[in-house]
Amino acid sequence: MDTAKKENKEIKVRLLKIQETVFLIDSPLLQSIANDTPQLNFDVEVGFSLPKDSENNTFEIRTIALYHYLPEPSEEEQEIKPARKKALELGTSNLFEFDDVNEYFFFKEDGLEDKFNVLPILLNISIGALRGILVAKTAGTCLSNFPLPIINIEAFNNNSPDPIADL
């Protein structure tokens, strides 16, 4: 098992499995978009969900990435909000195993308490896996020019009043 130290506490955790849970790509849409399309024409959303409890000392983080294409509006449509077209959706399940998950997390009805600040590490691993799968899935498409942006997990967690973000 890999270990990390926080406040003289050895944390034993290992990544058991990364699994694709959802994959949708609009190939005709992406083929119609030029490879030099500006990044402003894409809206990227990233989300994650955390477990509400744990079985067998496992901890699952589910991640999702959505890419929406924002076509250039015609002159008549310029006053109307542009229609977003879903170009890609990718979801993953990232399963971690702890020596004793309840030693590191306290599962509450309204959220999750991270006792040793382990969650940012697990989220970074999960989003990194999502990013890698996206690179492989978008090779040869116009989306290959727009990898998943870097995400500051600490800022994301601190801005959310609810530590559990639903997908």
Image (cartoon, rainbow, N blue to C red):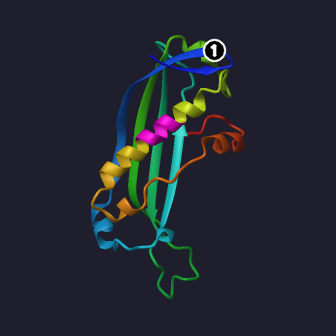
Left-right relation of 32 to 97? left
Q: Is residue 126 magenta?
A: yes
Q: Is residue 16 magenta?
A: no
State the predominant SS element of the stretch in magenta: helix
Q: Percent position (x, y) of residue 67?
A: 44, 58
Q: Is residue 84 visible?
A: yes
Q: In the rendered image, which residue does mark 1 sit on?
A: 9
Depth check: 66 or 125 in front?
Answer: 125
Which corner quadrant holds the N terminus?
Answer: top left
Disc 1 crowd, CA 10 A, few/some/many (<14, 14-19, 20+): few
Which residues fall within the magenta stretch?
Answer: 124-129
Q: Relative to 49, is 136 above or below?
A: below
Left-right relation of 130 to 139? right
Say what secondary structure mark 1 lies in: strand
Q: Percent position (x, y) of residue 13?
A: 49, 19
Query: Residue drawn 58% across and 82% down?
Result: 79
Depth check: 45 or 144 in front?
Answer: 144
Query: Residue drawn 41% across and 39% down?
Result: 129
Q: Residue 160 is drawn in which quadrant?
A: top right
Depth check: 8 or 25 in front?
Answer: 8
Query: Residue drawn 48% across and 41% down?
Result: 127
